[in-house]
Image: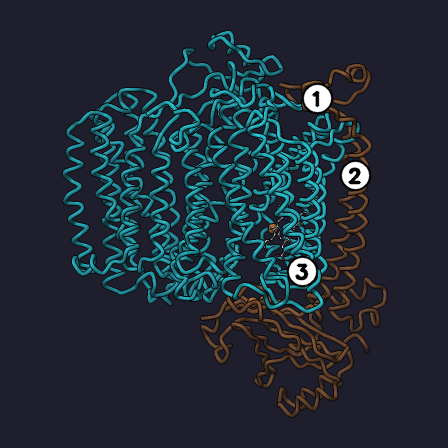
Chain colours: A brown, B cyan
Amino acid sequence: MLGSRVILNILSGDPTVAQVSRDPTDVFNDLLTAFLVMGTIVGVVVVAYILHSAYKYKIDDTPAEGQYDIDTSTFADEDETESVARPQLGEIPSGVGKGGGKKLFLSFAISALIVVGLIIFAYWNLLYIEDTPEDAIEIGVDANQYDYEYTYPSGETTSQLFIPADKPVELNVTACHPGECGTPGEGDGEVWHTWHSQDLSAGADAIPGQYTQTWVQESDPGEYRVQCQELCGAGHSSMNFDDGVVVMEQDEFQDWCEDEECMDDEELDNWLNSPAEGDN
Amino acid sequence: MADLPPRSSVKRWLVTTNHKDIGILYLITSIFFLVVAGVLALLIRLQMLESGGTILGGAEYNQVVTAHGLLMVFWFLSPFAFAFANYLVPLQIGAKDLAFPRLNAMSYWLYLFSGLALIASFFQGGTHEGGWTLYAPLNVPAFVPRVAEMGETTAVIGLVLFVTSVTLGSVNFLTTIYRMRAEGLRMRDIPLFSMSILLTVWMMLFAFAALLAATILLSSDHLLATQYFTDEHGGSMLWAHLFWFFGHPEVYIVFFPALGAMAEIIQTFSGRRLVGRKWFIIAMALVAVQSFIVWMHHMFLTSINLPIKTIFMVTTVGISLPFDLMVFALIYTMIKGRIRWKTPFLFALGALLIFILGGITGVFLGAVALDYQFRGSYWVVAHFHYVMASGAVALIGGLYYWYPKITGKMYNEFLGKVHFVFAFIGFNMLYFPMFLVWETPRRVFEFPEGFTLWHQVATAGAFLFAASFLIMFYNLFRSLYSDRTVDSSPWAYTGSAEWAIESPPPEGNFPGRPSFASGKLDFVSDPATDGGVEDGHAATDGGVAHASTGHDVHMDHASWWPLLVSLSGLLVAVGIGGIPASYVLWPFAFALPFFVAFLGIEGARQDGRARIHDLYVVLSVPFLLALLGGFHFHHGLVDGFAGANNTFYLTLVGAVLGAYTFAGIGYEKFNVPEPELTEAWPFENVTNTKLGMWTFLGSDIILFGALIGSMIFIRFQFGWTDWWPAAGYTDKAVWPGLVNTYVLLASSFTIVLAYVYAKRGSRRKTLAFLSLTFAGAAVFLVNKAYEWNELYINQGWTHTSDIMGSTYYLTTGLHAAHVIVGMLILLFLIARAYTGAYWSDDEDAHTVEYFGLYWHFVDIVWLFLFPLFYIL
Ligand code: HEM
Ligand SMILES: [Cu+2]
Ligand SMILES: [Cu+2]
């Protein structure tokens, strides 16, 4: 299968280096920046144009004698000469208002191009995000009211997510009671949560009985915040953990994992020592 | 009762069916809910002053957030728009009233009472705590603290009542707009506000049917302990699909009327006809259709796969483009305008500005990779407040714009502008910071330290925004008593018909029959003559203008029944949540014999006593006794009634009142003559009632479609072929279903014959075939009862046993409920036919036909259920 990552590499003109360890955070930041820049430009232009027009065509709105609005008959002369269709009481409106059509479609076309362009760019990045790196190991994330439990390949569970720097980790996210996860009926008794780490630009719904995937990768060791972004009950507000993810130097992680027996030693070795995807 | 008391009398407001009165009632009520929901919003913002909260606990906070969302979206924004719709649509299209005035009054009372039920739920241990999206399975009793069980259920039932109100309203507006336009006013020519309402009610008709399905399933999970949304195979996803299939159209439903108002206001105060009017309308129509295929953009983070995400990303972005065009149309309308910066204009302009920001940030959300992070964050909160509150702001503009029309007085312009300035600043202070601290998860009150300042700015903005409305209340209230009277149009460059009549408009709306036959609005004063008809021909879309007898027929305007019917709904809504599952259906069962008796009693009062009425009263007694026997078998007569709680009796009273009021409203002689000489393309050849029936059935199709779809969805998730074996059936008996299929088909045939003989004027045969239809339905039910007895009692396979049981009993049960309703109507028809209705008058015979439409529909539904539940 031609993975989307491959397509991306080809498209980028450099099949080997360009996409090396682009963290989800980088992708998200690039995208957001692009959208913010274009969004701001479009917004500022349109808003400025509106204000300008509203001001430019403002007339003296002093009401006519005994009235609350202007007296339209003072414009009778102008009306004769100009081609603008003014509303008239009791008219049948359609088919009369001409003008402005061309401009309308032109501006529509331009804005449509911008939107479509942005979305294509976004889609391109989506394919990257959707394509979990081959060398990622999978860690289960089980959300419950109101905590997370992480399950390593060995079956070892932890309450924080410990991962090595610069290594992709796939998260397999669901919601279940601790201790009942992975068994029939596991979703019983749990509700919908999400697992989100804004710091790592990753997130997935945690739905009882369903599995959703996302992946994380981070180069800077440290603690990262994890939070639930779906209302899940009275404790939802405090379902956030400033040290929910702990990114460690790789050798540090290796020690930790060997202590905790988080995965098979050989597997661990292979994983940490494998070259980053695309490096070869 | 027929004529209306004066407006100064309280009674007037309880019995009125006049569209302008109802509009005012909607206006006041929706503002009341705005205030309630606004106070809740201020509580939210106070709680957000610092991380960790200052005033509310977790559960209370969730209730406040939930009720705020529900009230604002359902009980404020849409009804606020429909206040104007009620008041203005008939005026704009040249109709005297809506097509079904009594139904309109019923929509209003159901709306008011459904909101009161929601507020009442706060006092029943606590209202719903799962957010306005009511995600599953947090929305089922298993996850609700015991104290709040009743309140949670009441909130859901309140929603069901509200949906009923909306459905009736949609049917009413669709019929009105299609069938009651002034002569010469083609569909494409109706004013923009009416056009936006037309598209809104189309969306409402279908979207709210899906919500009805969702809330019926949810109510059933609450009341009867079925397992739809706790089902681990897909209960959560099922809710999300059902809710968002409704929910996305809903966001346009709340916005469209505002768009229409914006267009009219900008047009008037720019003194320029809307640029690209045709394209504007086409774009709106496109959005209305497309709104039904974007719902999964609310579910990008769920387990749906990439191809589906891609499709929904495309449709989502696609739907933003028509909006683009509409925004530009509004902007270009200002060019070369003669713009007066009056209060309504300022509000419309402000709404446009904030809508643009909301729209742009919506495109961010449409980019799936961004939405992965935004989903469930304050970015979404900021986005939808920008767009939705843009709608509210535009409608406030509408309020200032039409205030002089409705009251006959001009508001104070200076205070209006002050209101605008504070509202606009307050609004942006409130919501813009939310973009900056978007990483805050929504619906929480704990956030990283660094966000505190911005949340405090938002809170300050909230208070400013709220305070600005005090200025408006003061202004609008004081102006009522000012001497600034206005004539027909205080504004220059108005176009639509409401500005051509005095302010406030007189009782009958127009000083004659409105007609556009000459190419512009005239009020034709003579009674319709043949000449008028010919004029009408010239200007139609190829349709025929209607003519009928010229003289002015008496029209009824007052009825107590809409209020009373809805009141019974309120009693049931606040009571039913407290009833244990095994008692829940009994109040409604007991109401049936009462209904039969009331049919006899009311029938005797209205139509003159006849033997059939005596028969009904007499038969209701053994019927009731039989039910009491059943109750005895189930709970024990004495123990059962002694053990039932207060809410049981409250519901019982509500149900019996319902039985009485339905009989009452059925027999009431309420004359609403079909208007003469209207533009009714493309429905010239049907009556209002028939079109109403069609549209109603349209929504019913969606209801059953959603129920059947739910079953199929869950079955797929479960494993299609494992389904029945898991329920313990390898071999289910097909014959009961087969027999019932034939019985129902036969009864469809007999109802047609009843109509045929009614038209031919045969009393005996009309009665005979109506009775045969009733008998067919009865056989169906008996057979069904036999089958259910076998499954439920003998085999012990109940609706709570497993998800198969839940879907089976609920879906076929809802169909059976439709059959029972049909039988009740048949009883009514039989009584009326007995005393001379239908067969003695050609027009009247159509009533049987309309019922026939319903009955065929019920049969057709069965044709889908039968294979699904018996064969596959
Ligand atoms: C420019 C066109 C628009 C686009 C592309 C758009 C896109 C979106 C998307 C993708 C979401 C889902 C966000 C998420 O939950 O992750 C969303 C949420 C929402 N949008 Fe929009 N939107 C647009 C216009 C509107 C309009 C006109 C309204 C209503 C007046 C609206 C009201 C809402 C609401 C209420 C929600 C949040 C629902 C909830 O989760 O509670 N949007 N929008
Ligand atoms: Cu949560
Ligand atoms: Cu949506």
Which chain does the residue under circle 1 lie in?
Answer: A
Report if residue B348 is visible in the image.
Answer: yes
Q: Residues within 10 Å of mark 1 (few under 14, many from 20)?
A: some
Foreground residue among A227 and B242: A227
Determine whether the residue tagged by mark 2 lies in a helix, strand or loop: helix
Q: Nearer the viewer, residue A44 or B46?
A: B46
Disc 2 packing (10 Å; few <14; some 14–19; many ≥20): few
Q: Position of residue B593 (x, y in %)?
A: 21, 43
Q: Which residue is mark 1?
A: A96
- Find numbered disc 1 in the image and state the secondary structure of the residue it sits on: loop
Q: Residue at x 64, y 37 (%)?
A: B259
Left or right: where B704 falls relative to B798: right
What is the spatial separation of the Cα atoms under label 1 and label 2, in whole angstroms? 27 Å
Cα–Cα gap, marks 3 and 1: 50 Å
Q: Is mark 1 within 8 Å of ligand 1?
A: no
Comparing labels 2 and 3, the label whose residue is closer to the camera: 3
Location of residue B60 in the rendering, given as x and y in whole percent from the top left corner:
50, 62
Determine crowd level at label 3: few under 14, some 14-19, many 20+ residues with C-alpha closer than 10 A.
many
